[in-house]
């Protein structure tokens, strides 16, 4: 039905947004989804003593403001959904109260734990039971770090809620566990399609914490009466959407029925392809790809690439020094800088932790005997060219794993506002880039609400709605041979 209105909360590592989605007919009678942002707020990592945390209560406060604004602006959403970054969680005690401040996935308490856990479980065995790339921040290592620190929170905790489920719980009072987030923990076994209790027991992680996952499109429950009273708003149902932002974004890729490759471009870059089954092979493990649960029963074979985080951190450093340049200004400087002067490998582990990013880039270049980038323009150019080359490497690996060739790359997410990056990517790949939509996570979030409401039949129909509603920018590759030469040099850095 046209007029159906939904509310999406899309939480990123640096900002959160509340957006309204409305089904409407255009002048030709075609059904379209219209999206408008009603609230945007910053999200900060906060260092508290030795640890890096999220400010969960601030997020709750801003979400309440978003709900109030929705109704004040005359929208009457019947449902809402929450999507966030992966892996992080809060713990509840037996009274259902939040135990402390959730850790941020970039906290250093998981340093060195990949090796330690591989020693206990075996790398290959762990991969077969989880399907995930070995990333230091996976929920498994975070819980194991708490265990090693003899955290009393772990002893009294009754329930673990992943971030989107936690935020939904704080608004509804209903505890739930959504499938796509569950598959980012490394404690969920995609083969048996259940929590890996044996693995939890081996690592001393209490299995009582975990609820049975529900699939995207499931109704969780209504706003809690006290929240309705506080905000002065009517009842609204929470829907478990693809609560992992990456999965919501992939749901909003305007692809047809043919196999396709995607790049979700935000703080992280997630490059991969949609599958109907996880690919739990040794080759997948060695090429460092993940199998993440997606919406509509899919699995997404993808690689985590450090992404625009590196650029965001450089900008933060310059801002703090008082040299405030906007992203478009920085990109303009990069455009003017000399091409292919120096390259980094974005997934070198040194780039993961916050702070000192400019120096880290310079030291990488120095160690690899390249000219050291000095100016802002040189540094940004180095980052963007390196990301584009990394995308080519990851796309070739995805083609190897699936034994398919993709005719181009769908790019979605906020990062595609960086047109230079889209252009570089098309050039590096020698294939077209189809960029859009920008607000993919929020749109994917809305799509699963529309599925829950019976407005969309399935993922295919939802994707057609995206293709009908949002324009796409096409970037055709240039024939600049320098990209191939640069790729040879990039591959020489030796990381998969
Ligand atoms: C992207 C993302 C990635 C996940 C990373 C950390 O926003 O959700 O998929 O690996 O954040 O949670």
Image (cartoon, rainbow, N blue to C red):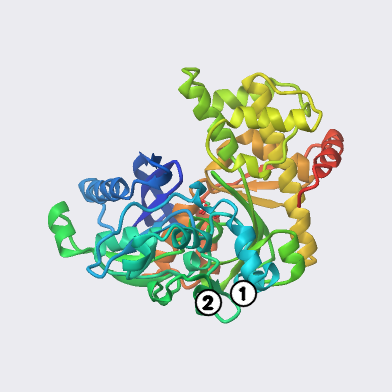
Q: Identify the residue shown where x is 46% and y is 63%.
A: 242
Disc 2 to disc 1, C-alpha distance: 8 Å
Instruction: Left or right? Give the position of 106 relative to 134.
Output: left
Q: Identify the residue shown where x is 64% and y is 59%.
A: 115
Q: Does the CB distance between marks 2 and 1 fall below 8 Å?
A: yes
Viewer-proximal residue among 412 and 494: 494
> Percent from the top left, x then y, of residue 194?
51, 79
Please name the residue that numbered disc 1 is placed on.
129
Q: Is residue 477 above or below residue 241?
A: above
Residue 14 in view, yes or no: yes
Q: Residues within 10 Å of mark 2 (few under 14, many from 20)?
A: some
Q: Earlier in the sequence, mark 2 or mark 1?
A: 1
Q: Residues within 10 Å of mark 1 (few under 14, many from 20)?
A: many
* Quarter the N terminus occupies: bottom left
Q: Is residue 12 above or below residue 217?
A: above
Disc 1 secondary structure class = helix
Disc 2 secondary structure class = loop
> Percent from the top left, x then y, of residue 431?
77, 47
List the single residue furthest toward the bottom. Answer: 192
> Percent from the top left, x then y, of residue 468?
53, 56
Viewer-proximal residue among 414 and 142: 142
Q: Identify the residue shown where x is 43% and y is 65%.
A: 448
> Percent from the top left, x then y, of residue 440?
51, 52
Instruction: Left or right? Give the position of 127 relative to 482.
Output: left
Instruction: Left or right? Give the position of 374 relative to 158.
Output: right
Q: Looking at mark 2, is its residue's CB closer than 8 Å to ligand 1? A: no
Q: Identify the residue shown where x is 32% and y is 70%.
A: 158
Please name the residue that numbered disc 2 is placed on.
196
């Amino acid at each position: 039905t046209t007029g159906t209105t939904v509310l999406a909360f899309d939480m990123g590592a640096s900002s959160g947004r509340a957006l309204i989605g409305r089904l409407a007919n255009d002048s030709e009678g075609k059904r379209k989804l219209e999206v408008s942002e009603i609230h945007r707020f910053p999200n900060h990592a906060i260092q508290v003593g030795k640890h890096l945390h999220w400010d969960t209560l601030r997020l709750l406060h801003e979400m309440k403001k978003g709900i109030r604004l929705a109704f004040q602006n005359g929208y009457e959403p019947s449902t809402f959904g929450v999507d966030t970054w992966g892996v992080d969680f809060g713990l509840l005690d037996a009274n259902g109260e939040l135990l402390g401040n959730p850790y941020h996935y970039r906290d250093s308490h998981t340093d060195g734990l990949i090796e330690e856990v591989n020693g206990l479980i075996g790398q290959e065995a762990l991969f077969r039971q989880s399907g995930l790339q070995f990333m230091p921040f996976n929920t498994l290592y975070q819980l194991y770090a708490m265990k090693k620190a003899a955290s009393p929170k772990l002893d009294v905790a009754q329930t673990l809620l992943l971030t989107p489920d936690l935020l939904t719980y704080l608004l509804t009072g209903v505890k739930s566990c959504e499938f796509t987030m569950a598959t980012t923990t490394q404690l969920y076994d995609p083969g048996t399609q259940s929590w890996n209790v044996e693995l939890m027991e081996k690592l001393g992680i209490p299995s009582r914490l975990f609820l049975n996952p529900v699939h995207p499109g499931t109704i969780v429950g209504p706003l809690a009466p006290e929240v309705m009273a506080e905000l002065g708003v009517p009842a609204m149902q929470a829907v478990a959407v693809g609560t992992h932002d990456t999965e919501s974004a992939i749901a909003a890729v305007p692809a047809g029925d043919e196999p396709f490759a995607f790049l979700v471009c935000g703080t992280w870059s997630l490059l991969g392809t949609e599958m109907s089954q996880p690919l739990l092979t040794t080759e997948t493990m060695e090429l460092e790809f993940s199998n993440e649960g997606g919406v509509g029963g899919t699995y997404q074979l993808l690689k985590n690439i450090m992404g625009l985080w590196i650029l965001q951190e450089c900008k933060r450093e310059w801002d703090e020094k008082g040299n405030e340049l906007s992203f478009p200004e920085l990109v303009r400087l990069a455009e003017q800088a000399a091409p292919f002067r120096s390259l980094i490998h974005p997934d070198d582990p040194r780039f993961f932790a916050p702070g000192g990013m400019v120096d880290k880039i310079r030291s990488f270049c120095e160690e690899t005997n390249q000219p050291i980038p000095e100016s802002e323009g040189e540094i940004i150019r180095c980052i963007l060219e390196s990301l584009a080359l990394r995308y080519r490497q990851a796309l070739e690996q995805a083609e190897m794993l699936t034994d398919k060739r993709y005719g181009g790359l769908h790019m979605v997410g906020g990062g595609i506002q960086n047109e230079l990056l889209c252009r570089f990517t098309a050039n590096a790949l020698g294939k077209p880039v189809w960029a859009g939509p920008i607000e993919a996570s929020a749109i994917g979030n809305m799509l699963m609400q529309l599925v829950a409401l019976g407005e969309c039949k399935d993922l295919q129909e939802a994707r057609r709605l995206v293709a009908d509603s949002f324009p796409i920018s096409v970037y055709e590759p240039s024939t600049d041979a320098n990209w191939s030469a640069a790729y040879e040099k990039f591959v020489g850095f030796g990381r998969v």
